[in-house]
Image (cartoon, rainbow, N blue to C red):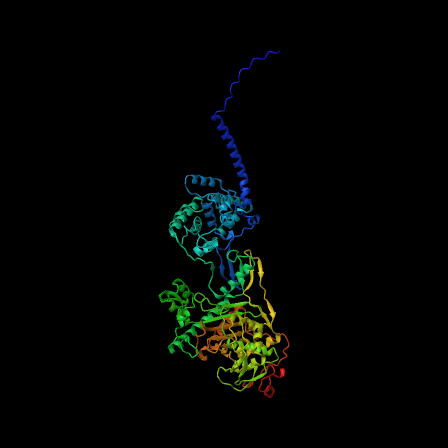
Amino acid sequence: MAVPSPPLPPAPPARLPTPSGRWPRRLVRWGWALFGLSLVLFLVYPILVSTNFLFLFGKSPSLAELESPKVEQASELYTADGVLMGKYFRENRSPVPLSKISPLLIKALVATEDVRFYDHAGIDGPALLGALAAAARGEKRGGSTLTQQLAKNLYKTRRGETRGGLGHVPGLNTLISKTKEWLTAVELERRYTKEEILRMYLNTVEYGSNAYGVKVAAKTYFNTSPDSLSAVQAAMLVGVLNNPTAYNPRFHPEAARRRRNVVLERMGQAGILKASEVGALQALPVALDYHVERHIDGPDNYFRGAIGQVITKWCDDHDLDLYRDGLRIYTTLDSRMQDHAEVALHERMKALQRNFDNFWRNRGQNPWVDEKGEEIPDFINTQIKRTEVYKTLNNRYHGNQAQIEAALNLKRPMKVFTWKHDDGDTTLVMSSLDSLAYYKHFLQAGMMTMDPYTGSIKAWVGGLDYRFFQYDHVKQGRRQAGSTFKPFVYLTALDNGYSPCDRIRDQRVTIKYVENGKPMEWQPDNVTREYTGINMTLRHAMARSVNSVTAQLTELVGWDKVAVYARKVGITSPLLPVPSIGLGSAGDVSVYEMVDAYSTFMNTGFRSQPRLITRIEDRHGNVIQQFDPVQRRAISPETAWLMTYMLRGGMEEPGGTSQALWDYDLWHKDNQIGGKTGTTSNYSDGWYMGLTKDLVTGVWVGGEDRSIHFVGSQQGEGGRTALPIYGKYMEKIYQDKSLGYDYGHFPDPTVKINKKYTCTSPDEPRRRRESAVDTIAADNLLERMNGDNGVPDSVR
């Protein structure tokens, strides 16, 4: 039996590690883990930011955006003759090449904002470390390079969709934005030369006073160009960049001067300026030629208002922004013709207003009168309730009439329109009620010229002065056309079997018709209240604007058909098919429509859609859209030519209503002009429609309200109010040889004219003509054939 071994002595207890030995190893492991994580984050973080991982970091510039950065740039509006009419912008910017920027400005910028610009690749390490050290000491010091600032300006790295989810966390948002600027700056340096970066920077940076880019800044502060900036001006602009608000020389001249002197000092240190020059320039005061541009810059006019609506809609349809995409919009307007139109209208309206004021002053009453010529009581108090001023006060005082009346009668200095000063304005102390009464005394006007063959609108004057009267009397305003609507009656007749030589007797007539199931009668009066009894040719009757003949012809062709033909050639406003349609009382129309319609006659029966724009280009000069003339056949070429022949009758027929034009210098080279006057029954509206071989023009004159007018034909008919504007305007057009418009005959017909049109009016003196005319016997024969009912033999 085996003897058991003696038991082994017990093992000594294991020694537990002391705390002092365990924690150092843990710290080392944690340190390595943190280092590894930091290294991974350092390497991966830029990728996460650039790819907008989980939408946490916001959008970064794409490759396409880096290759072709899109900067907000003002859209520009040009006339047909190349004159800049104005701009549309949020950030007013007009880029220029580096070669057109003063070298002093470029050197001052680098010396002040980024002294190692030509050495770094987008990030300036020493400057960045210096900024971090300054931040640790509680100081503020910039470390961004020009390229980083450009990245921020170009791609808006701190706003909108570039922020992402983490961009709203304080502290992180700054880090992420800075990271994007660093990454973008490096990419910009890879893709562009230093000169290209400088060009982009100077053309995008803000200089205060709504000036973006050096070109606009130079104009805003010094009224000069970027290549003409002096050393002190360049230093001022570079100084503004540090804080466009605090160092704005217009509003903070002392702060701007101190900052300018810092820039001059840096220019001296960089060897750009001599020490003696620096001292002399620093002693100079701040000198500005300040002119800030508005969001819609340029002279206020009615054409700008009309075209703005068209452009805005076009931009919406094409997903473009008028205020930032740098479009170049070329219009049909000719600046020279526009000037001539404005001058002619102003000259006549100034004299007409003087006559108007004297007329009512002599009568001892205000010009707002009823049908009996008596002043309308309480007119201004009634009118004020239709204004926005009254509506605002009514809301503010909750309908309390005592408070409203007190506010309306409160007097204060107001800048108002006047004909007495060349600049068109004066300051008067008056209340809102006084102001309304003051403005109601003014006669208004509207005028438009169009090329009938292309539809190009060449001149557009919507009123006296856009600063004070924004209501546009060319397109927005609509009034009864009076006798200028008569040609549409004769158009209907000529296109339905009648000829210019057919005759209707000038006699008192009664037109019977049915309205709303009730039998009605209408007896039209001639303007003179007299009837000659002459069996007039249609051309003679239209030339003399004989109401009785027009009314009979309207009944013969059908007043509903007259409305149809008016719409065919260009009238778009609603028209009532009533017997008096030929006298202009079927509805209100605009100057814009009337010019369009009359242009159809000159354009061989094609109606041209009125054009405001010829083309739109992008910021690089590429044509986005060309606006070619749009035309459609409205009436036959024979009828169209006959209508131009009829309209010439106003000058050529005895007693024609256009013959006041003989007083103007328009009649060289056997020039031909067609036209038609128009006056409403109470003289509230005066019209003239004029045609030459090249242009069609419409003019309207009248009060703001229909109750404001002259009371007799000697003062208020269209031949005395609107026609003189046309006459003076056409004088200026012909005298301006740069326009290329010359005197001459109307175009010959493009087709054979089958209808008889050369005929002698009964009271016209016999004279030699190259073309054959009717003999007296033929005239008498036509009269007997037409008889009393005036139906032409061609439709018997």
How many numbered circles are shown?
Answer: 0
| Residue 598 location (% of width, % of height) | 55, 73
Residue located 42% across and 78% down the image: 373
> Where's residue 207, x and y in %?
45, 52
Q: From this view, report whether residue 503 is shown above or below residue 282.
A: below
Q: Is residue 220 above or below residue 701?
A: above
Front in this rendered view, residue 667 or 721: 721
Image quarter of the N terminus? top right
Please state the horizontal and vertical placement of residue 670, each as a whole percent of the image.
Answer: 55, 77
The residue drawn where x is 47% and y is 61% is 298
Q: Position of residue 639 (x, y in %)?
A: 60, 76
Q: Is residue 594 above or below residue 227?
A: below
| 621 versus 171 height, above or below | below
Quarter of the image for the C terminus: give it: bottom right
Which of the two residues, 60 or 292, is positioned nearer the viewer here? 60
Q: Quadrant of residue 535?
A: bottom right
Residue 707 in view here: yes
The answer to whether residue 604 is visible is no
Please tell me which residue lies in front, 205 or 435: 435
